[in-house]
Every structure is written in C-alpha cells, then in structure tokens.
Image (cartoon, rainbow, N blue to C red):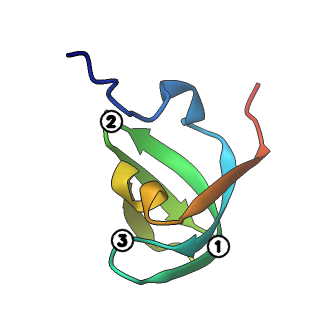
C-alpha cells in the first residue's frame, strides 16, 4: 500500500507568511513570519517579534493555517 508523505516545499524559504489557528499542542498562533529554513516535516520561521519558532507539518493537521503574504523573487 502506498502512503503519500506530507512535507513542506523548499520554495517557501524567504517568503513572508501569516500563521493563524491552533497547533497540535493547543498554542494559538496569530503572527507574521519569515520562513528561514525548511526540512521535510519542519519549518523554521522568524516571527515579527524576532523570536524563532519551529512549526511541524502535524500542526497543520491539527488546524493551523498558513498563507503566503509576500513571495521572494
């Protein structure tokens, strides 16, 4: 049986994103962020506050949403 693997796209690096909703741990997100690093199942972002956070692909299954608000050229 084939199972599709979810992963973040490398093209997100350098883009500004808006993250909102709740992650799998119940933390509420409402922030603009710059995507700094992407691996298969995690994404490192720099928030507008300067804090660095790691977002897991599973967080989006739990209800977290992300929208690209600015794309690098």
| Residue bearing the label numbered 1 | 31
Which corner quadrant of the image does residue 24 belong to? bottom left
- Quadrant of the frame with the N terminus: top left
| Front residue (pair 53, 3) | 3
- Left or right, 3 with respect to 19, comes to left
- Quadrant of the frame with the C terminus: top right
Of callouts 3 and 2, the N-terminal one: 3
Q: Secondary structure at mark 2?
A: loop
- Residue 51 in the image, given as x and y percentages of width and height: 46, 74
Q: Secondary structure at mark 1?
A: strand
**Residue drawn where x is 73% and y is 32% of the image:** 72
Distance between the alpha carbons at the discs numbered 2 and 1: 21 Å
Residue at the far front: name it. 1
- Residue 8 in the image, given as x and y percentages of width and height: 45, 35
| Residue bearing the label numbered 3 | 24
- Left or right, 29 with respect to 43, comes to right
């Amino acid at each position: 049986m084939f199972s599709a693997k979810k992963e973040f796209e490398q093209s997100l690096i350098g883009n500004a994103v808006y993250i909102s909703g709740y992650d799998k741990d119940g933390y509420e997100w409402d922030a603009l962020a710059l995507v700094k690093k992407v691996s298969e199942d995690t994404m490192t972002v720099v928030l507008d506050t300067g804090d660095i956070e790691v977002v897991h692909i599973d967080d989006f299954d739990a209800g977290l949403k992300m929208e690209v608000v600015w794309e690098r050229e």
